[in-house]
Image: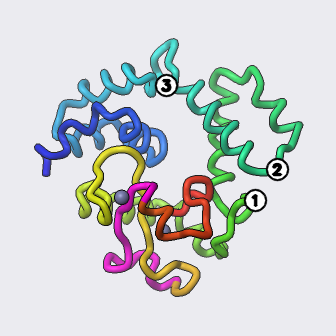
């Protein structure tokens, strides 16, 4: 597996998914790709994803994502105004909070998945994150429908959480899917914006 995944650290979107979205450490990513920690650090910097590096594009990328997420919902003029000229650490922290709130789903205007508060709590939990990482690893970070590797991956529940919450962390009920294939599984949900994992 190590050989096959070795090049993934060069893929910006994949790195972003692992480092920014899944919040894996540089060390953990290095382990997945079977390369040195410095190699990951270098590529994070190269793609502007390393927030510790001056002039990093990471904060700007995050601003873009915030705007994108906000634009998918109701346009609260106050929030849009707040995004203007936001740079630096305090702002980044607040944006991170707002982004994770958007990801909670239930409050999101596009959310149609019938999220229970149980699921909401669970998806944010360390236990679920560990489960998700384990399942991505089991599936070799490859879309189980079309075989695509790289870019964003979601963890799809074959029997949805809304139908059976006991199967949320059942290994036989989940598979890694690329965004395109995941969207096909949920024709009525905007999977990208609803952050169904
Ligand atoms: Zn696919
Ligand atoms: Zn799904």
In front here: 96 or 106?
106
Q: Secondary structure at mark 1?
A: loop
Looking at the image, do the residues carrying marks 2 and 1 touch, with CB atoms under 8 Å apart?
yes
Q: Which residues are magenta?
A: 165-180
Query: Residue 109's spot in the image, x, y percent?
Result: 76, 59
Q: Secondary structure at mark 3?
A: loop
Q: Quadrant of ligand 1?
A: bottom left
* Most distant residue in the right direction: 77
Q: Which of pointers 1 and 3 lies earlier in the amino acid sequence?
A: 3
Q: Secondary structure at mark 2?
A: loop
Kindly identify which numbered label has been placed on residue 74.
2
Looking at the image, do the residues carrying marks 1 and 3 touch, with CB atoms under 8 Å apart?
no
Q: CA distance from mark 1 to mark 3?
A: 30 Å
Return the residue at label 1: 109
Q: Quadrant of residue 157?
A: bottom left
Q: Which of pointers 3 and 2 lies earlier in the amino acid sequence?
A: 3
Query: Residue 92's spot in the image, x, y percent?
Result: 64, 31
- What crowding class fits label 1: few (fewer than 14 Cα within 10 Å), some (14-19), or many (20 or more)? some
Query: Residue 15's spot in the image, x, y percent?
Result: 37, 37
In front here: 89 or 160?
160
Q: CA distance from mark 2 to mark 1?
A: 7 Å
Task: Examine the structure image and report whether residue 172 is included in the region drawn in magenta.
Answer: yes
Residue located 66% across and 40% down the image: 68
- Whether residue 160 sits left or right of residue 151 in the image: it is right
Kindly identify which numbered label has been placed on residue 51.
3
Residue located 24% across and 30% down the image: 37
């Amino acid at each position: 597996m190590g050989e096959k995944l070795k090049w993934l650290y060069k893929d910006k979107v994949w790195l972003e998914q692992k480092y920014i979205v899944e919040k894996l450490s540089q060390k953990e990513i290095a382990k997945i790709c079977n390369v040195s920690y410095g190699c990951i650090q270098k590529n994070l910097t190269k793609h502007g994803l390393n927030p510790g590096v001056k002039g990093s594009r990471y904060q700007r990328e995050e601003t873009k994502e915030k705007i994108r997420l906000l634009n998918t919902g109701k346009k609260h003029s106050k929030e849009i105004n707040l995004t203007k000229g936001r740079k630096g650490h305090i702002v980044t922290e607040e944006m991170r909070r707002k982004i994770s709130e958007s990801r909670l789903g239930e409050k999101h205007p596009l959310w149609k998945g019938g999220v229970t508060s149980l699921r909401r709590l669970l998806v944010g939990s360390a236990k679920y994150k560990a489960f998700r990482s384990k399942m991505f690893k089991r599936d070799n970070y490859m879309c189980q429908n079309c075989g695509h590797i790289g870019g964003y991956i979601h963890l799809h529940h074959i029997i949805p959480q809304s139908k059976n919450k006991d199967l949320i962390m059942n290994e036989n009920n989940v598979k890694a899917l690329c965004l395109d294939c995941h969207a096909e599984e949920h024709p009525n949900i905007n999977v990208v914006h609803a952050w169904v994992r």
